[in-house]
């Protein structure tokens, strides 16, 4: 005979187990959660089968579910075993129907919000160009080593950087699919102990970014100063601060404390995803003053005045200034070489000026500051070095690339 009533089920809150009869009972946890359980014996063993939580499953529904389980027991069927089998078959059917492209797009929707827009575009472009045409419509559960090699082989030797990134992205997507129980077994896109035995290892490039010697930079700065465009001002700030192109081109006024003479670049705009403070010298402030008031948000505007300056604008302005043999990133190398050869500043100060992570984990653990004051002295010395050349020396350095009749 049943012992529970709808009112009793609804009003009872004391933790415990409340029997309804014939193996059905209501379980109330210490946190107040109420759930239905059907207890039965099968082949000499006791089993507890969950029937759902109250109030989603009412007393009447729980009794009907228990009656169904009793009928299956009378037929020699284990109700819980049958449930597990149905769940397994459902997962198997889901694995058969989920394509690699579907799983990849889910991975992108999940993770892209934490990436930079540029990184997300690179992911989509590489998958759309190299992966989807070959394996995009195949079930993700069927992706094996041969299929991964079909994607990588055409680009492995011709575009090694892209191929390496594509392999890693396939591996991440397949790992996510396995975590969602859409596939089983080892990941066919893993490198170590698998694809490294089937594909040749890429030779690491040891060529540094093309850079100017420090002694030639003042002449370049003088020429940039005579060019009236935002890209020239951005290039000047990049050289003076030894920062990266993306950090300068995407600079926002809200990041600058002009009175305190500090530029704080937020973590999401830094390569290492750590906030970086740049001490501002008088020369840097003069550059900023020239573009102040052009826009409320962005320091350096694109040609259409719709957003930040694109990174390739810096390379174009260097070409226009006659510095075709160097790239914007190379000025960081120029600065680091100058600091090592012509100053006595400690290595960690120079490395932090470049927002580099300290190689020694022990050193990094104990040195958690950013050495702002010491770096300010270093950057003041760098600015002074760039402004020490006499005007006639500057013009002499520029005379080779400057057209006749120039100012």
Image (spheres, rainbow, N blue to C red):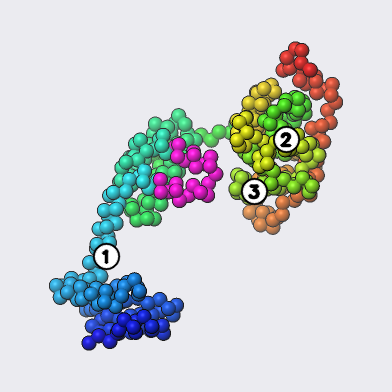
Q: Is residue 112 magenta?
A: yes
Q: Which residue is mark 1?
A: 84
Task: Provide the secondary structure element on which disc 1 rests.
Answer: helix
Q: In terms of image quadrants, where is residue 243? A: top right
Please report whichever mark, 2 or 1, sits nearer to the chain's N-terminal start.
Answer: 1
Task: Provide the secondary structure element on which disc 3 rests.
Answer: loop
From the image, state whether disc 3 or disc 2 is nearer to you: 2
Q: In the rendered image, which quarter contains the N terminus?
A: bottom left
Mark 2 is surrounded, within 10 Å at the Cα level, by few (under 14), some (14 to 19) or many (20 or more) other residues, namely some
Residue at 63% from the left image edge and 40% from the top image edge: 250
**Which residue is nearer to you in this view: 238 or 326?**
238
Q: Is residue 21 magenta?
A: no
Q: Which residue is mark 3?
A: 266
Q: How many marks?
A: 3
Numbered range of the magenta stretch: 105-126
Mark 3 is surrounded, within 10 Å at the Cα level, by few (under 14), some (14 to 19) or many (20 or more) other residues, namely some
Q: Which residue is mark 2?
A: 291
Please report whichever mark, 3 or 2, sits nearer to the chain's N-terminal start.
Answer: 3
Mark 1 is surrounded, within 10 Å at the Cα level, by few (under 14), some (14 to 19) or many (20 or more) other residues, namely few
Instruction: Report the Cα–Cα distance between label 3 and label 1.
Output: 49 Å
Q: In terms of image quadrants, where is residue 210? A: top right
């Amino acid at each position: 005979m049943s012992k529970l009533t709808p009112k009793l089920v609804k009003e009872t809150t004391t933790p415990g187990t409340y029997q309804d009869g014939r193996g059905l009972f209501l379980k109330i946890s210490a946190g107040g959660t109420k759930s239905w359980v059907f207890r039965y014996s099968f082949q000499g063993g006791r089993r507890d089968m969950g029937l759902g939580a109250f109030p989603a499953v009412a007393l009447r529904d729980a009794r009907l579910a228990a009656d169904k389980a009793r009928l299956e027991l009378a037929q020699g069927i284990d109700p819980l075993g049958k449930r597990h089998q149905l769940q397994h078959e459902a997962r198997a059917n889901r694995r058969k129907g989920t394509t690699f492209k579907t799983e990849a797009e889910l991975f992108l929707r999940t993770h892209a919000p934490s990436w930079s827009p540029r990184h997300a575009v690179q992911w989509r472009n590489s998958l759309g160009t190299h992966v989807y045409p070959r394996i995009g419509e195949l079930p993700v559960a069927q992706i094996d080593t041969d299929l991964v090699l079909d994607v990588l082989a055409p680009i492995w030797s011709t575009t090694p950087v892209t191929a390496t990134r594509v392999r890693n992205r396939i591996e991440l997507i397949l790992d996510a699919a396995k975590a969602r129980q859409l596939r089983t077994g080892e990941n066919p896109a893993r490198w170590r102990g698998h694809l490294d035995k089937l594909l040749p290892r890429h030779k690491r490039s040891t060529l540094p970014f093309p850079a100017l010697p420090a002694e030639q930079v003042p002449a370049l700065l003088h020429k940039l100063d005579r060019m009236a465009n935002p890209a020239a001002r951005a290039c000047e700030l990049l050289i003076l601060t030894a920062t990266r192109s993306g950090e300068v081109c995407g600079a926002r006024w809200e990041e600058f404390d002009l009175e305190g003479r500090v530029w704080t670049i937020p973590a999401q705009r830094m390569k290492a995803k750590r906030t970086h403070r740049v001490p501002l010298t008088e020369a840097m402030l003069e550059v900023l003053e020239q573009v102040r008031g052009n826009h409320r948000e962005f320091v350096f505007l694109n040609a259409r005045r719709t957003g930040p300056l694109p990174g390739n604008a810096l390379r174009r302005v260097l070409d226009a200034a006659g510095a075709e043999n160097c790239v914007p990133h190379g000025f960081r190398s120029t600065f680091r070489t100058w600091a090592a050869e012509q100053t006595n500043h400690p290595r960690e100060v120079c490395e932090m000026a470049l927002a580099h992570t300290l190689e020694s984990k022990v050193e990094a653990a104990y040195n958690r500051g950013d050495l702002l004051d010491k770096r300010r002295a270093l950057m003041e010395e760098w600015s002074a070095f760039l402004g020490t050349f006499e005007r006639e020396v500057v013009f002499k350095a520029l005379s080779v690339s400057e057209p006749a009749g120039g100012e």
